[in-house]
Image (cartoon, rainbow, N blue to C red):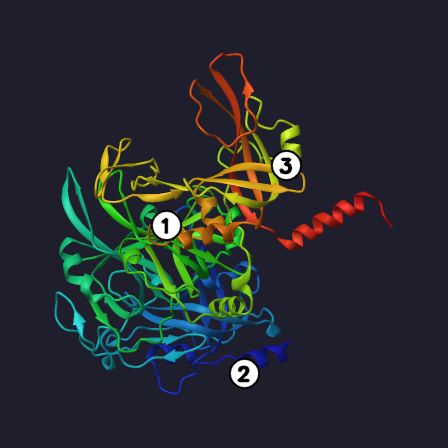
Amino acid sequence: MANIIAKAMARVDAGALNDIFDNKPGRVEQPVVQCVNIKRISGQEPGGPERYRVVFSDTKNYVQTMLATAANHHIQSGALRCGMLLQLLGYQANNVKQRKILIVTDLKCLEEYGELKKLGNPEPLKVKPEDENTSHPTTITSNTFYGNSSNQHQQSMVSHTKAPTSSDHANIYPIEGLSPYSHKWTIKVRCTSKSDIRTWHNRNGEGKLFSVNLLDESGEIRATGFNDECDQLYPAFQEGSVYYITSPCRVQIAKKQFSNINNDYELTFERDTRVEKAEDQQDVPQVKFNFVRISELASVEKDTTIDVIGILRDVGETSQITSKTTSKPYDKRELTLVDQTGFSVRLTVWGKTASSFDVLPGSVVAFKGVKVSDFGGRSLSLLSSGSMAANPDIQEAYKLKGWYSNGGQSENFSTHASVTGTVTGGARSDPFKTIIEVKDEQLGMSENADWFSVKASIQHIKQNTFCYPSCLTEGCNKKVNEVYPGQWRCERCDKNHPKPEYRYILSVNVSDHTGQLWLSCFDDTGRQLIGMTADKLMEIKETNEKKLADIFSDANCRTWNFKCKAKMDVFQEEQRQVLSLSPVKSSHADEFDRVRYQVQAASPLNFVAESEKLVALIKQYNID
């Protein structure tokens, strides 16, 4: 035992903690210390992450340490225990209210020494009276080192107050160390997202605001500027740049309904908040992503905020919708993303992002802060607090680009289109049927709708009425009428629009080896079958009839798996054309019952899955 203690004493870097806070040249950058105490601190609000206060000793001195939540797993897994030696890989030294506190972001446990009694006779680190004016920030990360005197950072400044002095950056806080009890601090952060200026009007008055998302190695936080601060600070921020932000700046409980940032707190800029662009733009990490694969969207709850990355397969035209609440028009553009899981998803961008979107199809695009919707199946919408990066310099992007360039672009992709009216209390069964079985079993002839799946090939798509002009108001989708040139009216919304958004309503004849069937397809399915938006196809129709015919011809003879709903339609007196079987006479003289087969989802064949089905069928015959 004595031999182990001697080895441990030799391994600890005695005096390293004092050197860190004095920023001494030649100090050990990643010192070995001993853990002498661990205390759990509850989160700042219910459901928030646990925090740990740890005391580290270098045998001469000891110091209180706050563990970043990213390093919590060392304690929660039992790897870090009292008495153990560890190596500090990432940390930031701070003087707070005449106390020295070390923020640790990364560490390595040295388990070979086991759990030991306290080594040496360490004393608390003392704050020298002159520290407030002479100390320098010390920051170590697991992959970079910097600790230069803050008088090297003489930047151009956007501020309401005096120019910065050499002591302005003495106390660099990590974002994770901010709380309502933090008063004098400076953070060094990267602006990962900057919103447009938004205005509001209510009974209490009117105003304007903007917000930015800020990032450092320890985490993210949202900051908002109102009215005068909006005017003063909005021009200071540029997405992707690094800034020093210095208090006074209010730290308050985050309003989660307005932000997708994983932080219990948020910042509000004040009159004297200082924002200064940093000369060194490299030592703060880029945007952090937590990607969800497109194939996994079906298991993500509605309204969840996620990050996603994919190949840009299709770029829709810019259109406008009118907000139901404000009656203001908003630009929108629909994009289609695919990834190597074989799935595609529709993602909508808004405002300036939509109108100025210039990324080319085939590019890799990463989105941070998109909302998951289940309207017509899983789809995504970029939030105003979210951000987008084209061809980002990250590993996931290179993998996607390599896959797409080596055959991925020729693959067929499935979607997460879902069936409306899903039975509550469990998943609905969509049994596979052949076309002859659909007819013989008279699916759709009962009072309730019948659901089924069918594998069939497209024989013909009617071209005379393949789409309709719809309302631009969000969530309406009702047909609009052109009352005079450049004015389209929606009776439901009681509004006029300068143009409509065309949406598919296709009549498709399909067949399998047992027969033929007419199916009705709406916009989501139509985009898949045709390969473009109805707006784009209408433009082609108006300029090039031959190209239009070729597009419909190309859609023929393709085989899809269709999920369908069969339901009885009852029409009185004059009959309109429906997609149906032969009419069945009802008990009422002027009524006919017809069955409509409506496609709820379509996906191209997955040949691996189809082969597995065939193998399972063959096994049922017990053929050796």
Residue marked by disc 3: 435
Q: Earlier in the sequence, mark 1 or mark 2?
A: 2
Residue marked by disc 2: 10
Residue marked by disc 1: 541
Three-letter code for the amino acid on which mark 2 is drawn: Ala
Q: Which quadrant holds residue 67? A: bottom left
Q: Which quadrant holds residue 316? A: bottom left
Could you say where residue 16 lies in the image, as x and y percent from the top left?
42, 80
Three-letter code for the amino acid on which mark 3 is drawn: Ile
**Viewer-proximal residue among 582 and 392:** 582
Res 74 visible? no
The CA span between labels 1 and 2 is 82 Å
Could you say where residue 36 lies in the image, as x and y percent from the top left?
49, 67
**Viewer-proximal residue among 157 and 251:** 157
Three-letter code for the amino acid on which mark 1 is drawn: Lys
Which residue shows up at 45% across the image and 45% down it? 524
Which residue shows up at 55% across the image and 59% down it? 411
**Residue 589: which disc?**
none
Instruction: Give the number of marks.
Output: 3
